[in-house]
Image (cartoon, grey):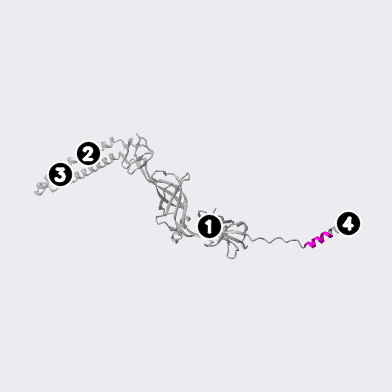
Amino acid sequence: MTIFHRSRLSLAGALVVLSACGKLPSPPPAQTPHVKTVAARTATIPVTKEYAGRVSAYRSLEIRARVEGVIAARHFIEGSKVKKGDLLFTLDRAPFEAVLANARAELAGVDAVLTNARSREARFRPLVKETAISQMDYNDAVAALDQAEAQRAAALAHIAQAELNLGYTRISTTQEGRIGAALVPEGRLVGKGEATHLATVERIDQVYVTFTVADSEALALRKAIQSGAIEMESGGAVAKVTLPDGSTYKEAGKLDFADMKVNGDTGTVALRAVIDNPNEELLPGLYVRVMLTLGQRPNAVLIPQKSVVKTPTGQSVFVIDAEHKVERRDLVLGSWAGEDWIVEKGLAAGEQVVVDGVQKVRPGIEVTSESLSPVASQP
């Protein structure tokens, strides 16, 4: 038998064997995707905002020379604490003492003239009644008396001004606090033409922290408070400060001022918090982060952060409906609340969102799901 005939017989035999074994097996059916879900929940959460702020002194007092003179002595240690009434500078007193002595001498001369004018008016008074002198002479005596009394009043005013200026040569502080560096050395002429700035006393047992809020954000917060979406704290907004090293300052403060106008150059509104600073850890000029708690937001809808999918048009989640089918839901999200997102629009409490298996699903397909508690869904 030829090789060709043997090959045809082998092929025929193989076909017979395949026919006996039946048809080729078909591929197994596709499995239904399995995902894990979490129900969107509601909670009352604090409404917090973070801003960049700067520390300033609670009270800042500029020590200035109120009269022209030469600084004779400085009576404080720079950077030390001072009490109300403490003497800080003295000016050379000699020129002011001379002016006071001259004013007192002027008063003595005026008193002599006044005594003479009173005596003359007293002598002329009965004489004018007896027509022993003319009415004009008596009127001149009265006018001279009035003039002498006016001169005495002016002399007394000169003395008061001279005493006041002499008192200004002793420059004291009117508040307690910590004094900075002396801005003018001893021996320098000060107060010529203006009240020269000599030093600054700052009270920092309490401090202000000022910061700014965008006008659009301030408007949105005001509307949320007015609508009841945010319930204000009974004691007002609370401010916590984070220091440049990342640590949180232990004392909490209160918002005590909000500007009534928008800065036209920056489009922001200025706010200020006051914070106790008993150990003077917060120094004026320090830059800090301010965590402002405005109040509470009741019935906020929360979903885990890992359930949110970023899309070219925004952010969305996959929701499993009652028929176990997948629906994509576009959302408007607010801020973070711990490990959750706050949902502003697009989702209701109780709806099941996919947190595990997001990559397996697409809108419209049917899935099997396992519902987790919100705590289990958090990393």
Q: Is residue 370 magenta?
A: no
Q: Nearer the viewer, residue 20 or 58?
A: 20
Left or right: where does residue 328 sit relative to residue 205?
right
- Magenta stretch: give its range: 12-21
> Crowding at label 1, few (<14), some or many (≥20) Cα neighbours within 10 Å?
some
Disc 3 from disc 1: Cα separation: 101 Å
Q: Name the mark on residue 374.
A: 1
Report the mark closest to the observer, 1 or 2.
Answer: 1
The residue type indicated by label 4 comes to: Phe
Disc 1 from disc 2: Cα separation: 89 Å
Q: Which residue is disc 3 drawn over?
A: 118
The mark nearer the N terminus, 3 or 4, is: 4
Left or right: where does residue 91 sit relative to residue 253?
left
Residue 194 seen in the figure: no
Disc 2 secondary structure class: helix
Report the mark closest to the observer, 3 or 1.
Answer: 1
